[in-house]
Amino acid sequence: MTAEERPDPVDHALAEALQEGDQPVVDGRRRRWEEHNLARRQVIIDAAIAVLERHRPGDEIQVQLIAEQAGLSRTVIYRHFDDRADLDRAVQRQICQQIWTELAPALTYDRRPHEIIHNIIDNVVRWAVEHPTLLWFAERDLSGWGPNPLAEGIEDIAESIEEIMSAVVASLGAELTAEDRAGLDPWVFGMIGAVFSSVRRWLARPVLAPSVDVSVGILTESVWLQINGMAASRGLDLPDVPVSQMLEAMVDGEPGAR
């Protein structure tokens, strides 16, 4: 009997319990069976990412390579995913979770606004340099499978930045107009999306130039000029202090902090 034909011991145990009609046993084994399936899915996703890391952006990744990396057969892989697109989308979600893990520490109120922007961009650029194929794969369009996970991830980042911006505006004792509040989301989303597009274009160059530090500096300056410029056009002078200090001043009844 081949590996593909051999029954899964967990499936076999569950079938026996169902025949016996022992509900408590069935529930316990069903729970273990579900945990087994989740663990197996994660092994497959991790294997796919490991295979991607060994290839260049644009390379075709065969399911057989993923199966070999996971120590499983192709048949077993398709027991846990509906088809190749389902597997690819799960891998995209995992990659986006990695990106979010890298960015989360930068989204803190304990830094000055300019530092927050710099740290976010620095983390994005350095992660992309280390994982160019993962970035390429995360951006792939799987038509018919709903919103791209990377687009959803950018939305999450944009929402976090919006919250920081709103806190800064409130600390200055200002209030956005209804039009500005409505326009904040697409504007911030566009800036974050532009950063990812710029990084992708930069990584595609035969020679990686300018350097990482210079690229981070240019992107940071570009985004900061937009934010600072929008604030200035509305009569807001952004203090060069940590956001947390601005909020403390607001609590003390002193809008802003110099």
Image (cartoon, rainbow, N blue to C red):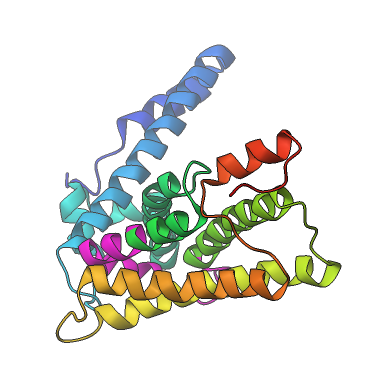
In the image, 13 versus 247, the foreground residue is 247
> Residue placed at 73% from the left, 71% from the top?
234
- Is residue 9 depicted above or below 231 in this figure? above
Q: Residue furthest bottom?
A: 206
* Front residue of this view, candidates 129 and 93: 129
* Location of residue 54 in the rendering, given as x and y in whole percent from the top left corner: 14, 63
Please report the residue visible at 38 percent of the width from the left and 56 percent of the height from the top: 119
Q: Is residue 239 visible?
A: yes
Give the magenta range: 123-148
Q: Give the number of callouts.
A: 0
Left or right, 49 with respect to 112, comes to left
- 69 displayed left or right of 126: left
Q: Is residue 87 left or right of residue 176?
A: left
Between residue 20 and residue 82, name the one nearer to us.
82
Q: Residue furthest right?
A: 178
Q: Position of residue 136 (x, y in %)?
A: 32, 73
Q: Is residue 136 among what the camera can see?
A: no
Indicate the quadrant where residue 1 lies: top left
Determine if the magenta segment contains residue 128: yes
* Name of the residue lying farthest toward the front: 258
Above or below residue 222? Residue 238 is above
Image height of 59 relative to 18, above or below: below
* Spot occupied by residue 42 in the image (x, y as percentages of width and height): 34, 44
Q: Quadrant of residue 43?
A: top left
Q: For this rendering, which residue is in front, 136 or 87?
A: 136
- Residue 22: give x, y in percent of width and height: 55, 14
Q: Residue at x 22, y 86 (%)?
A: 205
Q: Is residue 75 left or right of residue 196?
A: left
